[in-house]
Amino acid sequence: MMILPLSIFNIDLTTGNIILLTSLLMFVAILLAKVGIKYGVPAMLLFLLIGMLAGEDGIGIRIDNLHVTEFLGHLAMTIILLSGGLETSLDETRPIIRKGISMSTLGVFLTIVITGTFIWFVLGEKIGGAGKTLMGCMLLATVMSSTDSASVFSILRSRRLTLRENLGPLLELESGSNDPMAYVLTILLVQIMESLESVSGISGTWSIILLGIWILIKQITIGFAVGMALGHAARWLLTRINLSSSPMYAILILSITLFSNGAASFLGGNGLLALYITAIIIGNTKELPHRKNILLFSEGITWLAQLMMFLLLGLLAKPSEMSHIMWPALFIGLFIMFIARPAGIILSLLPFRGLSFRAKLLASWVGLKGAGPILFALYTVLEGVDGSSDIFNIVFFITLLSLLVQGMTVSPMAHLLNLSIEDDPEVKTFGMEIPEYMGMLRDHTVSEQDLAGGDTLRDLRLPHGIRVVMVHRGEKYLVPHGSMKLLPGDMLILILGDSDD
């Protein structure tokens, strides 16, 4: 049930009236995001703030069904991970895969331990029920430990930020793989805390802890196995099935990855990890039909998922309930940014060479919080964990702080550390695509200098292996031939591949 203030009218989630409010919120969010991106403000931050303004302490929209909210948020996260997996290149990721896994496992674990210890010894009594026990402090640290994949993908890709030392693929791999890790650890700690309430003695406590370790291993192993199996099965199917249109391929991939998530969860594994691995394998299929259209479809539903998820989570926030946790949350957030996260990243990368200290600093700075930590905090509320409302408010405040401070300074920090590269302009192929094994499509705008030796296509004397497949002139698309007269400003669509002459 959603209720607006002053009893102007009631809106039931099952009625068509919710469409009106949703469309208005989305419309405003998109317009503000366009302005925000121009000034370096993360779109995710604006979506959250708009949700807060429309929420119970703002316009007055209240969400009572937290289970539905958690389900929708989890579904949105799977779509975001799907998009990230499809766009992850194994050729770029393979050299840094061990670093990324170390950051998303050991790095997350070290960040949790350092942060949880700090909360327990310094701020435990100031954060309510969660701070009464060491396990509660570790749970709070665990919920905040992951780097939010939606925020990282959005900032790196929307700003076309290219980083040296292969940092871009490393950060995307870490953010995509540590969400599942943090989710598993959150569920595990909640289960351990619930079990410890019913046992006594050291032997009982150790048995619960050992059971938790077994569950963790089981979750990761089954999730990885299901992801690999369904990923390779999907690769075989997609290169052999003949569907009537490219959107059908995109929908088929969506269904396969969602099935991977559900199957792994049903078997007791990590569904998010399985989905992410399945998506990576599908995205790296060399002969994937309609790849460009599939990625465009994926990008579209990902933006919709991000928009809806951040707006929905913003509606849950109640600023009036955050005043008593504001200062503790500020100290915890700054501690994570400047001490816990850098320490966890640097220590987790000690066994590896080939990454400068500057790169490690930037990797630690891109520890953006977002929807993931908020959803994990919402899970503690649904499970009735002691102090869960304070956990949710603290995590929400730290997420806003992270998006504001870190999200707005990723590009300046990369420039300051001399790790950013000016990105090449986007290649325009006007929807044309070819299988990767046939070559690459590129564009070239004809200049006066190009026509100095003659004004026909034949006079360009293109190198071997380069052919013109289309000429774009004004509003027209022309089929090229050797005697075609070219004009300055014509855009040539080129194919670069092997040649036998």
Image: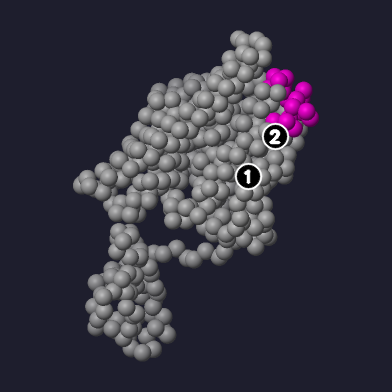
The residue singled out by tag 1 in the image is: 348
The residue singled out by tag 2 in the image is: 115
What residue type is disc 1 on?
Ser
Kindly identify the residue that appears in the image at 45 percent across and 63 percent down: 426
Rendered view: 42 above or below 320: below
Asked whether, in this view, residue 473 is left or right of residue 271, the answer is left
Kindly identify the residue that appears in the image at 42 percent across and 27 percent down: 265
What residue type is disc 2 on?
Thr
Question: What residue range appears in magenta?
Answer: 114-133
Q: CA distance from mark 2 to mark 1?
A: 15 Å
Rendered view: 259 above or below 166: above
Asked whether, in this view, residue 35 is left or right of residue 114, the answer is left
**Which dot, 2 or 1, sits closer to the camera?**
1
Q: How is the image coloured?
A: one colour
Packing grade of label 2 (10 A; few <14, some 14-19, many >=20) is many
Position in image of residue 385 (x %, y %): 61, 18
Can you tell which quarter of the image residue 56 is in? Answer: top right
Position in image of residue 203 (x %, y %): 63, 14
Q: Nearer the viewer, residue 111 or 81?
A: 111
Q: Which mark is residue 121?
A: none
